[in-house]
Image: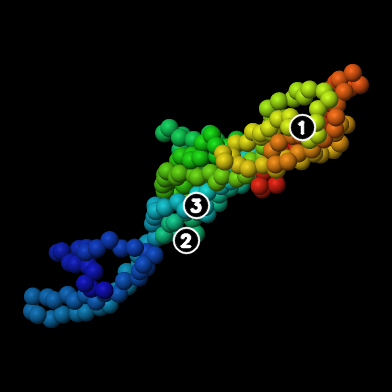
Amino acid sequence: DNAKVKISGNSLLSKMVFDFETQDTLYIRLQTVDNSGAYFEKEFIILVEDANDLPTDIVLSTDTFSENLPINTTIINLSTVDPDINDVFTYSFENSLPSDNAMFTIIGNEVKTNSQVNFETKNVYFVYINSNDGNNGLITKQFALNVKDENDSPTNQLLSNNMLNENNITPSFIGTLTATDEDVNEQFVYTFTTGTGDGDNAYFSISSDSLFASSIFNYEVKNDYSILIKSTDLDRKST
């Protein structure tokens, strides 16, 4: 390894930056010559002392997570790239910069949800994460966390009309059913269901999104009917 060092006077100097992880021992051979030309040679072993290396990168197990997850759900595992293979790292948010850090928490090497997120409201969150190797080695990195759109359940349904003249023909069209859903362009199947308010389901029928009277009504006999309808999207979520 003579080529990696040089001699200046009686001082031995390095000609390069040594890396313990790459090479921890150097082997050199030196010669000393006196005024009469006599010389002596000897081999030396130089040990490279390991010093703390800074972390070079923070790695996410994934940068995507689903919307509507419960609070405190683990969404990401963190790891650090560092030449010192035995270092133990502590992770934290860097809060000195504008970010979405408050939406999440870090426990150990896990990033967890601190709030429930909705793809339709916001689908990308920016966070700054620190990794500290415990030996004054610190790296900070920004990440964009992407929210995956999941199917949302319908939240409400409406009937365009709820009035019908008595002595009607059968079937008689009453109104059109529509459902409210955060997922745009969703399609729905409407069916009668059982439960509170289903007492008069048998007097009506549904075809596609249309409600029909399947019986002849007499105002003087009964003028108020209660039905219970379920709307189900194509992923079988319903309201």
Mark carried by residue 172: 1
Q: Secondary structure at mark 3?
A: strand
**Which of these two is toward me, 60 or 218?**
218
- Which residue in the structure is indicated by mark 3? 60
The amino acid pointed to by label 1 is Ser
Badge 2 crowding class, 10 Å Cα cut-off, few under 14, some 14 to 19, many 20 or more, is: few
Circle 1: element type: strand
The residue closer to the viewer here, 123 or 79, is: 123
Q: Tell me the element at label 2.
A: loop
Q: Position of residue 216 (x, y in %)?
A: 85, 29
Residue drawn where x is 41% and y is 33% of the image: 97
Reply above or below: 226 against 187: above
Identify which amino acid the numbered label 3 is placed on. Leu
Side of 186 relative to 145 (left or right): right
Q: CA distance from mark 2 to mark 3?
A: 18 Å
Q: Position of residue 113 (x, y in %)?
A: 59, 40
What's under tag 2, amino acid-wise? Ile
Q: What is the crowding at mark 3: few (fewer than 14 residues within 10 Å), some, or many (at least 20)? A: some
Pair 3/1: label in front: 1
**Image marks 2 and 3: residues in contact by CB distance under 8 Å:** no
**How dense is the environment of label 1, judged by Cα within 10 Å: few (below 14), some, or many (20 and up)?**
some
Residue 93 shows in this picture: no
